[in-house]
Image: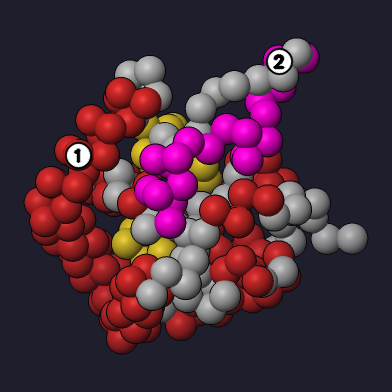
Amino acid sequence: MMYRKFFKRVLDLLVALVGLIFLSPIFITVVIMLIVTNNGKPFFFQKRPGKNGKIFSIVKFKTMNDKTDEQGKLLSFEHRVTKIGLFIRKYSLDEIPQLLNVLAGHMSIVGPRPLLVQYLPLYSDFQRQRHNVRPGITGWAQVNGRNALSWGQKFEYDVWYVKNLSFVLDTKILLLTVKKVFLKEGVNSSSNVNMEPFMGNT
């Protein structure tokens, strides 16, 4: 209980600070590359629900351009992602700026991934429990086959994490995340952009 209420946040701050310092050469290099390739826009911002459904702006490296069709709608992922963007996504580098969200208190290092705001009214009471904790950069669903999971399975993993949150579990998730990133097992695989949107319970 003490870990959930106090020590988790302390560890989040320490890990985020150390992470930003350690990754600062990569951070700066990616920013410069994206400024050049994305017309001066290295970051992508999007509204996401956090703890208790409170809305915040998540920040990532911008891996896609803003090209639209004749009707003004954004083109598909395949037509918008840049070569540098593919490389950044392949190695999960686009997640690094979220360490700033952790420092700001919007997110945790480990927790259910923040989904889209429009999904909020679609959740069942069970699924809504995922918002009882801060969302994370990585989570239990991400290390258990994120891209191969159905929405129902994802929510099962998210709620299970919320109910079993502990220092040991967070450590396990972090170690598995590092393993998957280095083995390129797709914790942040670009294939996730083609997932069917969540439509609620039918």
Is 35 left, or right, of 201 in this rendering?
Answer: left
Please tell me whether residue 16 is drawn above or below residue 28 in the rendered image: below
Q: Which residues are magenta?
A: 71-90
Residue shown at 46%/47% (left/top)? Answer: 86
Q: Which mark is residue 29?
A: 1
Residue shown at 34%/78% (left/top)? Answer: 179
Any magenta on residue 181?
no
Q: How is the image coloured?
A: secondary structure
Q: Main secondary structure of the magenta part?
A: helix
Q: Does residue 189 appear anywhere in the picture?
A: yes
Q: Nearer the viewer, mark 1 or mark 2?
A: 1
Residue 124 location, x and y as percent? Answer: 74, 61
| Cα distance in 3D space between marks 1 and 2 | 32 Å
Please tell me whether residue 122 is drawn above or below residue 62 in the rendered image: below
Residue shown at 77%/14% (left/top)? Answer: 71
Quadrant of the image for the N terminus? bottom left
Q: Secondary structure at mark 2?
A: loop
- Crowd band around label 1 with a 10 angstrom C-alpha radius: few (<14), some (14–19), many (20+): few
Which of 145/111 is in front? 145
Which of 152/149 is in front? 149
Any magenta on residue 78?
yes
Residue 73 location, x and y as percent? Answer: 71, 22
Q: Does residue 17 appear anywhere in the picture?
A: no
Residue position marked by numbered label 2 in the rendering: 72
